[in-house]
Amino acid sequence: MKHAILTAALAAGVVMPMSASATDLEVTHWWTSGGEAAAVKVLADNFNQTGNNWVDSAIAGSGSTANPIIISRIIGGNPMGATQMNTGRDAEELIKAGLMLDLTEVAEKENWREKVRPAKLLEACEFEGRIYCVPINIHSWQWMWLNRSVFEDNGIPVPTNWAELVAAAPKLREAGVTPLATGQPWQVDGIRNVMQVAIGGVDNYLAVNGDKDPDAVMSDENRAIWEAFAQAREMVDDAYSGRDWNVATNMVIQGDAAAQIMGDWAQGEFAQAGQEAGVDYDCLPGLGNTPVLDTGGDAFYFPKNSDPDITAAQLELASMLISPETQVEFNLVKGSLPVRGDVDLEAANACMKKGIEILANPDNVLPSTEQLLDSDTQGQITDLALEFFSSDMTVDEALEQQQSIIEQAM
C-alpha cells in the first residue's frame, strides 16, 4: 500500500512525483457557493498533482441535505472515495459499523497529534483510540457580519455588539434595509446556536450542552438566549424562508441587509466580491459580546473500499489535506482557519487575524454542539428553534421544551 506524503513542492510550484498509477477518486461535498467552489478547486488541483484524479461530486444544499445522501450511499454499498462531513459525531454510526477507513497509520507517521490544534479537533476524529477522519479547517459559527456603509450612509454608528444592532433596527427599517439576513432552517438554527455562547455565556453553554443539566436550561442566562432569539425573529424580512446562505450574505454585501449571523465561511463570499475586512465590512466574533470560538469545521472521511488502488489514493488525499501547503492555500480562500499551528498566515485578513488571536488562548476555544450532542438531540433542538422562530411561541414555552429535550439527551 502506497503512502505518498506531500512536501513543500506544492508551495514552490515543483511538479510532484506521479503515483504509480493514476486513480479516479470521487469526492462528495456540499461546497457549492462561489467562495466554496474556489476553495474546492485548491484541493482538487493539489490532489491532481499527486498523479491521481479528483472526481468532483458536489451536493447542492447544506450538510443537513447532503449527510443523508452520503450516509445512504455508504450504507447501501455505493461508497464514494472520500466525503466532507462536519467535524463531530456525524459519522459515528458508520465507524461503529466498520464502514470507514482507519487512518491511524498515516496519522502516526505524520505526527498529526503534535500538529493539529486545538487537540479537540483530532479527538473528534477518534473512536476507541483510532483515527477515522482528517480535520481540514476550523470553522466557527460565532460571527456576525456587518456592511459598514449601510450604517454610515444612514447616520447610524456601526454596531459593536448584538444590543447595538437591535437598537439600530428601527432606523434601518425606515431606510428600507433588512436589519438581519437569514434563510434556510439550518441558518435560523445557527443564529440560536451562536447566541448560546454570545448571549448566555460559556459556563451556561457547557452546562446545558456538555453537562446536560436541566436546571441550567431554566437559568437567567439561558432565558436571555431565547429573548435575543425572539428579537432576531423580528429583524428578518418576510421572504427569508428557504433562502440560500450565500444569497443572504450577498444581501449584506449589496447593502440590502445590514447584518448576518453566519460562520466564517461567509468570508469567502466577501472575498469573491472584492470586499476588504475592516473597510467594507466588519466581523464581530461572539456577536461582540463573548469573543470565543467553537471548534467546529470540516473533516474528510474515507469509506472502506475493496480496491487497493482506491485505498492508496484515499491515503494520499488524507496526507495532502493536512499538509502545510494545502492548509494555507485552502483556508485563505475558504475564509476558515487552518488546523495546523505551524503554518504561516501572514496573508490573513483582519477578520482571520481576529480568529487566530482568539484561538491563541485555549480558554477561548469551545467544542461545537456537534461534538457535545448526539444527532437525535441536535435534531430535536433544531426543530424547537425553527418552530419558535416562525411562530409566536413564548420564551417560557421554549424553555420548558428545551428542558425536556436535555433531560433525555445522551
Image (cartoon, rainbow, N blue to C red):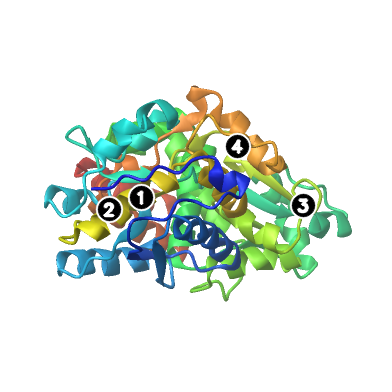
Q: What secondary structure is marked by label 2?
A: helix
Given residues 260 and 396, the one toward you in this image is 260
Say which residue label 4 marks: 355
Looking at the rendered image, the disc whose residue lies closer to the viewer, 4 or 2, is 2
Instruction: Classify residue 197 as left or right of residue 1.
Output: right
For the residues marked 3 and 4, what is the alpha-carbon distance in whole angstroms? 16 Å
**What amino acid is at disc 2?**
Ala
What's the distance in space between the residues labelled 4 and 1, CA to CA?
30 Å
Give the class, few, some or many, for how many residues have Cα within 10 Å of label 1's Cα (few <14, many ≥20).
Answer: many
Between tags 2 and 3, which lies in front? 2
Q: Earlier in the sequence, mark 4 or mark 2?
A: 2
Q: Give the Cα separation between the discs numbered 4 and 2.
A: 35 Å
In the rendered image, residue 387, in percent from the top left (x then y), is placed at 39, 64
Q: Which of marks 4 and 1 is nearer the N terminus?
A: 1
Q: Is mark 1 on a helix, strand or loop?
A: helix
Q: How many labels does the image show?
A: 4
Mark 1 and mark 2 in contact? Answer it, CB < 8 Å: yes
The kind of residue on which mark 4 rests is Gly
Mark 1 vs mark 2, CA separation in Å: 6 Å
Residue at (34%, 59%) from the top-left corner?
83
| Circle 4 Cα neighbour tier, 10 Å, few/some/many (<14 / 14–19 / ≥20) | many
> Answer yes or no: do the residues labelled 4 and 2 have beta carbons within 8 Å?
no
